[in-house]
Amino acid sequence: MEIKSPTLLIDKEKCVRNIDKMLQKAKNSNAELRPHFKTHFSSKVAEWYRERGVNKCTVSSVSMAQYFANNGWKDITIAFPYNTLESEEISDLASKVSLNILIESIESLNQAKENIKGDVGYFIKVDVGTHRTGIDPRNEDLISTLINESNDALKFQGFLAHAGHTYGCKDFESIKWIFDGAKKSLLQLHEKFGGLISYGDTPSCSLLDDFELFDELRPGNFVFYDWMQKDIGSCQIEDIAVCMACPVVAIHKDRNEIVIYGGGVHFSKDLIMEKDIMGKERRTFGKMVRLSKTGWNSEIIGNVVRLSQEHGVVHLDDDEIVRVKVGDLIGVIPVHSCLTADLQGYYLSTSGERIEKMTKN
Amino acid sequence: MEIKSPTLLIDKEKCVRNIDKMLQKAKNSNAELRPHFKTHFSSKVAEWYRERGVNKCTVSSVSMAQYFANNGWKDITIAFPYNTLESEEISDLASKVSLNILIESIESLNQAKENIKGDVGYFIKVDVGTHRTGIDPRNEDLISTLINESNDALKFQGFLAHAGHTYGCKDFESIKWIFDGAKKSLLQLHEKFGGLISYGDTPSCSLLDDFELFDELRPGNFVFYDWMQKDIGSCQIEDIAVCMACPVVAIHKDRNEIVIYGGGVHFSKDLIMEKDIMGKERRTFGKMVRLSKTGWNSEIIGNVVRLSQEHGVVHLDDDEIVRVKVGDLIGVIPVHSCLTADLQGYYLSTSGERIEKMTKN
């Protein structure tokens, strides 16, 4: 397949290696892997999990649950606060697959009871410090009330937490500190109320090993990884399994910049702050690499310093910029693979195969 | 049409008012409006222009040119540096519509000459200070060389500039200063080399009036506007013609926050920095408003302080948060309507009509 416009390349070998590593880690702790599919959005990538014995997944929306249910997934957790407006769609899903939803208030539990037809499990979302959603684990009165409402049609499954604040960490110690705190809270709840413990975020699942007391792990990003995870320390450059192939459309040697076809509508506008070689703070929207016959080379040769809607501006050193011509294809390791993946109509494997994914319509 | 998940509402009356105002401004200066369609991506919205006599448009990619050509647009400028890898697609387009491309180097002009079949016009992209793409207007040698290559098949049309650095302005004076500088450079080029002058960016086209010496104006964002344009001063809140309807999924009174279904995959991650009522710097990813029967109310009642993939977190005052319930639909004025629009599968008009748009596949 000839590449003429920004195209996200997927290295299947790297994905499979990342999956195998995480699966082994879950097995070592006797926990189940229920990977989050919000990173890849793809029935094809999902197959790579299924071939390795994974048959449960996590999604972040009802439409994503519908897509994976239509692609043969029979056990799905929607890890997003129950959207009461979608009770009809959830009822329909519940008639086809084993489905779990998240509850964090008596109001939404009552609404679920009233409006969802069919059997659905619910996890209580616990806030282990991210302060996005979830119940404070010390709020045992509310937790106890929510559990007492459990019945056969709407059944309490356990506690679910996402330590999303590990994304703000840059070293192992702070990630471990967050993990230890989350684990302590979850174990206390489990001891008091029973139920499963479902835990997941790519930094802690990548860097830690002791998940013995957890029932399931739900990381998602690790299948692709990205520059943000490399920056956090969750992975090495060589583990990153996605790279955008972008045409070079202009060269500005006077300011050491090239302009690529590849902008906010291809990468998203997610960015990280980093220090350049002189210690000066700068933004990065991606890292330039060279494409090769089998994929891409892991050596970073440029920094994506700006993105507009369709343009990307890459800063290169003198000795690198002279090697680039208009019409070349270069590679860019994305900062945030989940949001980049969301923006694609399809992916291309490094062996030239078109990989279908969920799209918006 | 029942709204159950994040849905971008379009107020057609406001769009039409914005279009009419810009058309009148162009007419007053005897310039032609060649609106940029990268804001709305929609054949339906494009019709609102056509009904008012506009028959030329600007796009930012070959695929967008194909979409609008397939929807009856016969005169299209691709305002993006010529991507030499798409010469085949450009040749195909040139056989169907009157097409202009952008050139900013002798390398791409030579490639265009060699590879594009059929007649295409070219504008020379001039850098009026944004430093993204384009030739320094003082580089008359290069400009002269590029013009001398003009022939019937690949014909020099004139000079095209986008003063994108007006997006960094917060007051009229600095926008006028940028505009005056750009105008001076473009007029000097026109006097020396002839050719059309094509100019466009929403801030200067919205705030200034004197375009007499320009041949065409290419603003795009103004049809929708957004919170960023309001912040720059290009428009009033009442002019913003798009608003995302989002379900409320969780309420956290203890921290004055509600969680909505509406995240980075719906809004993009574009943000602006602003000062809160205490003068403290904060990020905003959007502004919460109340939905009404005919659209939305322009009073801002909350600030979107964080976005993750599917979640948005909105900060509300004590007296506002008590009025919101799980299952409510609230409105969010997006920070950057172009990137938000790109993320939708379709739009919904405030009169309940589904508005189709270009999607990725």
Image (cartoon, coloured by chain):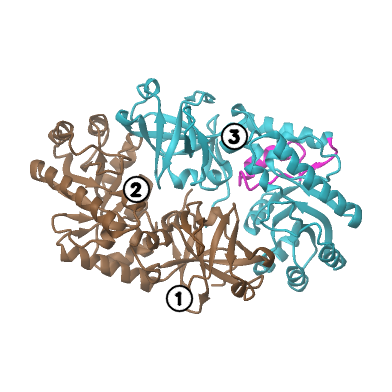
Chain colours: A brown, B cyan
Cα distance in 3D space between marks 1 and 3 = 47 Å
Spot occupied by residue B59 in the image (x, y as percentages of width and height): 67, 52
Magenta-highlighted residues: B29-55
Q: Nearer the viewer, mark 2 or mark 3?
A: 3
**Does the magenta portion include B31?**
yes
Q: Amino acid at mark 3?
A: Asp
Dot 2 falls on which chain?
A
For disc 1, the marked residue is: A351
- In this rendering, the answer to whether A270 lies above or below A290 is above
* Res A35 visible: no
Q: Which residue is mark 3?
A: B231
Check disc 3 and report its element: helix, strand or loop: helix
Question: Relative to residue B39, is residue A352 drawn left or right?
Answer: left
Residue A60: assigned label: 2
The amino acid beneath tag 1 is Ser
Q: Is residue B344 magenta?
A: no
Q: Residue placed farthest to the bottom in the image?
A: A293
- Towards the viewer: B53 or A282: A282
Say above or below: A44 vs B207: below
Q: Position of residue A119 (x, y in %)?
A: 20, 42
Image mark for residue A17? none
Residue B357's x, y, as percent? 57, 46
CA distance separating discs 2 and 3: 32 Å
The kind of secondary structure element at disc 1 is: loop
Whether residues under marks 2 and 1 lie with C-beta atoms below 8 angstroms apart, the answer is: no
Residue A137 location, quadrant:
top left
Q: Identify the amino acid type marked 2.
A: Ser
Sequence order check, earlier mark of 2 and 1: 2
